[in-house]
Amino acid sequence: MEQLIKLTEDISGIVWGWPMIILLLGTHIFLTFRLKFPQRKIGTAIRLSVKRDKDATGDVSQFGALATSLAATIGTGNIIGVATAVSLGGPGAVLWCWLTGVFGIATKYSEGLLAIKYRVKTANGKMLGGPMYALERGLKMKWLGVLFCIFAAVASFGIGNTVQANAISENLSLVMQEWMQPDTTKMLTGFVLAALVGFVVIGGVKSIARWCTALVPMMALLYVLGCIYILCVNYAYLGTAVSLIFQEAFSLKAVGGGTAGTVLMAAARYGIARGLFSNESGMGSAPIVAAAAQTKNPVRQALVSSTGTFWDTVIICAITGLVIVSSIIANPEISQEDGGMLTKKAFGMIPYIGTPILTFGILTFAFSTILGWSYYGERAMEYLAGKRSIVFYRILYILLVFAGSTMSLALVWNLADIMNALMAVPNLISLLLLSGVIAKETQHYLWDKNLDEEDKV
């Protein structure tokens, strides 16, 4: 088992190495320029996200689709992942993480556009879409769509399910250790969590979207308010923190006997990797639920989808990064801690309620991620084996929530990371090869000011 864990860890390191980072970031930058910087319309996108195209075709509101997507992306990666990037890559990693969000907006926009452009309506009126349909209908490459769905289904059991359930049970066992044995806490957590997940996912996309619409704004707001409090406490160090982030993001000084550029490369590697992993732009997961949105035309939902990366990385990850770096400057003794402990000590600066806020954030973020990924996995299974497979998928998904709460997950983490990277490759192929379609639709609806026009196709 140890050898298998080591092997999968090495493979994960390879697939999430520089080639993947360059491919993803390169796609972000290419689409940004090809589409004439759709980031300029983020204000319009935010306004559209809270509107409802009532007479449009779709299963859930645009905001419901966005909330479900955010539920799957805003997670422990935003809290602990950014701190891990800082601990491994230095303060400069925060800027590189933020830049992936800025450029990633264009990729998330493009994914949402293709999701609507190539979605299909089933016999019972349900809307289905995502990279598999863009590959099949737009590029006539169904075999790549099948590969994408295989990777997505496997990933849903890992990063979207068991590892999130494990994060919840581990945190609760630490909180409850004075009153209950850790194993008992994990077992009880598994039962309750599996029941809650089952209650929600059995209701389908409308039930998932309804819960995510309620959970996401509340959990994000509470977490951001906690961060703002810490930034107010660290006010005297904010200027130094911002200056340090920019300096180390482009520093060419050698570190630990390394060659020139080591600081810059470390900051870029961990910052970009963390940003890409956090917002999932280019991974192909978010367009699966974007396809279910009620929207007049592909560009309207594309704009709404793009706000997911804006909130996830440009705002939340950036605020988290400032909290971590300013806290390190204020308390240099914590600089050697790992990502999880860094975050815990930073939130410990909030009297009495700091640790509960962090714990609540981790619990709700992880739970919402389980809900969001359950929908991604369902659609992948339906594409592979038909709608009858959904019942079996849901049963297995719920059982694995319980299993994840009670087991060690080093191997599962590694496999999930590999599947996430493999998901991205077919999706990026569709984005790059269909960039002409994306540019044409964007020109007509966005830059020619036909955003309110209804797509008749």
Image (cartoon, rainbow, N blue to C red):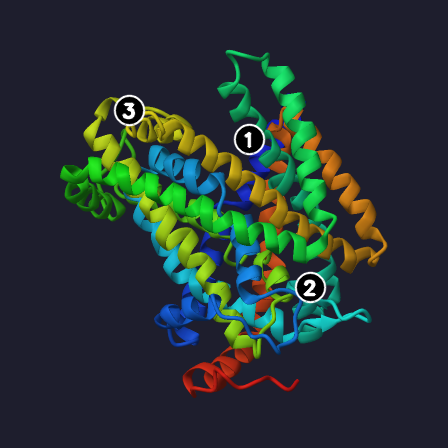
Residue 340: mark: none
Question: Does residue 247 appear to the left or right of 165 in the view shown?
Answer: left
Question: Does residue 233 appear to the left or right of 340 in the view shown?
Answer: left
User: Image point 52% across, 18% down: which residue?
Assistant: 176
User: Image point 22% across, 45% down: which residue?
Assistant: 251
List x then y, in percent, for residue 25.
43, 58
List x then y, in percent, for residue 22.
45, 55
Reading the image, the residue beneath label 2 is 132
Residue 167: mark: 1
The quadrant holding residue 199 is top right
Q: Judging from the image, what secondary structure is the residue with disc 3 in?
A: helix
Q: Which comes before the other along the chain, label 3 or label 1? A: 1
Q: Is residue 269 in view?
A: no
Q: Is residue 24 in view?
A: yes
Q: Decide: few, some or many residues near mark 3? Use Cα within 10 Å; few <14, some 14-19, many ≥20.
A: some
Q: Decide: few, some or many residues near mark 2? Use Cα within 10 Å; few <14, some 14-19, many ≥20.
A: many
The Cα–Cα distance between marks 3 and 2, rounded to whole angstroms, is 45 Å
Residue 334: mark: 3
In this rendering, is residue 289 above or below 197? below
Question: Does residue 377 appear to the left or right of 112 in the view shown?
Answer: right
* Amino acid bearing label 3: Ile
